[in-house]
Image: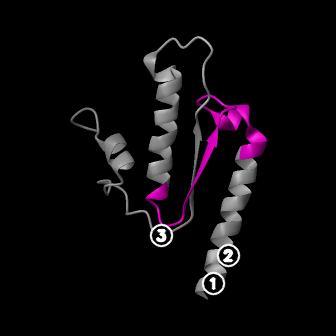
């Protein structure tokens, strides 16, 4: 960042190793993404077709992880933890269960 904007955002999405972070190990990963459609979209990003593409991109990205899981929601906007806190808690508990199960199987 000392030379300006970092490419870490792009590295993150392409799953390239980040310069300052270790490689993500083969662990359970859950991606929660909103595909909520907007009644009067103010930006191209919010039109129905763009929301569908957004869901496809997140699905493809999550599926690249060996233990990836995608959760698409049409009830939340950008912050599902604010709009659907119960769902986020449910997914965290499920992720913990998957992690615990995997650890037991490796023993």
Secondary structure beneath dot 1 equals helix
* Residue 22, magenta (yes or no): no
Seen at 21% across and 35% down, the residue is: 3
Q: Which residues are magenta?
A: 63-87
- Give residue 41's quadrant in the image: top right
Quarter that holds the N terminus: top left
* Residues at marks 1 and 2 touching, judged by CB atoms closer than 8 Å: yes
**Residue 57, image x, y percentages:** 44, 42
Q: Is residue 96 left or right of residue 78?
A: right
- Residue 36 lies, with reference to residue 81, above or below; the image says above
Mark 3 → mark 1, Cα distance in angstroms: 14 Å
- Residue 59 lies, with reference to residue 103, above or below; the image says above
Task: Provide the residue designation for mark 1.
Answer: 105
* Residues at marks 3 and 1 touching, judged by CB atoms closer than 8 Å: no
Q: Is residue 32 left or right of residue 24?
A: right
Disc 3 crowd rating (10 Å Cα; few below 14, some 14-19, many 20+) is few
* Residues at marks 3 and 2 touching, judged by CB atoms closer than 8 Å: no
Q: Considering only order in the chain, which callout, 2 or 3, is on the residue closer to the N terminus?
A: 3
Secondary structure beneath dot 3 equals loop
Q: Is residue 37 left or right of residue 63?
A: right
- View extreme (bottom): residue: 107
Q: How is the image coloured?
A: one colour
Seen at 58% across and 85% down, the residue is: 106
**Residue 4, image x, y percentages:** 24, 32
Mark 3 → mark 2, Cα distance in angstroms: 14 Å
Disc 1 crowd rating (10 Å Cα; few below 14, some 14-19, many 20+) is few
- Residue 91 lies, with reference to residue 34, above or below; the image says below
Mark 1 → mark 2, Cα distance in angstroms: 6 Å
Task: Provide the residue designation for mark 2.
Answer: 101
Task: Provide the residue designation for mark 3.
Answer: 26
Q: Is residue 45 left or right of residue 83?
A: left
- Give residue 17's quadrant in the image: bottom left
């Amino acid at each position: 960042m000392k030379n300006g904007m970092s490419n870490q955002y792009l590295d993150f999405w392409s799953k390239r190793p980040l310069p300052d972070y270790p490689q993500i190990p083969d662990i359970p990963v859950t991606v929660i993404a909103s595909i909520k459609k907007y009644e009067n979209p103010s930006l191209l990003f919010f039109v129905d077709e763009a929301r569908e593409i957004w869901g496809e991109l997140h699905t493809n990205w999550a599926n690249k992880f060996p233990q990836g899981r995608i959760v698409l929601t049409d009830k939340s906007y950008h912050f599902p933890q604010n709009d659907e806190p119960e769902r986020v808690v449910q997914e965290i508990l499920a992720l913990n269960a998957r992690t615990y199960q995997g650890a037991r199987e490796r023993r």
